[in-house]
Image (cartoon, grey):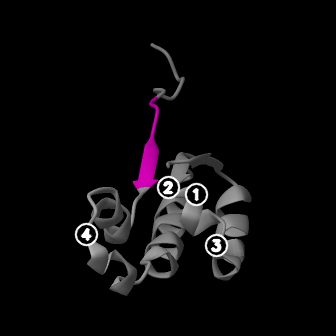
Amino acid sequence: MTTEKPIASLSLDLDNKWSYLKTHGDPGWERLPSYLDVVVPRVLDFLESRNLTITVFIVGQDAALDKNRELLRAIAARHEIGNHS
C-alpha cells in the first residue's frame, strides 16, 4: 500500500463578466466592477485550509491595475499566476 498523496492539476480562471461582454462588443462592459477583491481572499483561505496550491489565471487587464497589486502578491506568495487574456 502506498502512502503517497494523489496528484491532481488544479487551475482557476478569474474572468470578470466585463471581459466576456467586451470580447463580444457589448458597450456596457465598462459599467461592471471587478469581483477579484471578493473572490481572491476567499479562494486563498479555502486553499490554505486544505494545503493546496494551484495556478490562478487572471485577465491581463485586471492584473495591470494598481488596485490589484496586493491581490496578486497574495496569490504569488504560494501559487502560480498565469495570464488569461
Relative horizontal placement of residue 7, taking residue 19 as reference (left or right)? right
Disc 4 versus disc 1: nearer the observer? 4
Q: Which residue occupies the foreground of this view, 62 or 43?
A: 62
* Residue type for callout 3: Leu
x, y percent for residue 54: 54, 45
- Compare marks 2 and 4 and give the one earlier in the sequence: 4
x, y percent for residue 57: 51, 50
- Compare marks 2 and 3 and give the one earlier in the sequence: 2
* Residue type for callout 1: Gly
Q: Which residue is mark 3?
A: 71
Marks 1 and 3, how far apart at CA = 14 Å
Could you classify mark 1 by the number of other residues whose Cα lies within 10 Å: few (under 14), some (14-19), or many (20 or more)? few
Q: Secondary structure at mark 4?
A: loop
Indicate which disc residue 50 carries: 2
Disc 4 versus disc 3: nearer the observer? 4
Instruction: State the extent of the magenta-drawn residues as a range.
Output: 8-13
Indicate which disc residue 26 carries: 4
* Quadrant for the N terminus in the image: top left
Q: Which residue occupies the foreground of this view, 47 or 57?
A: 57
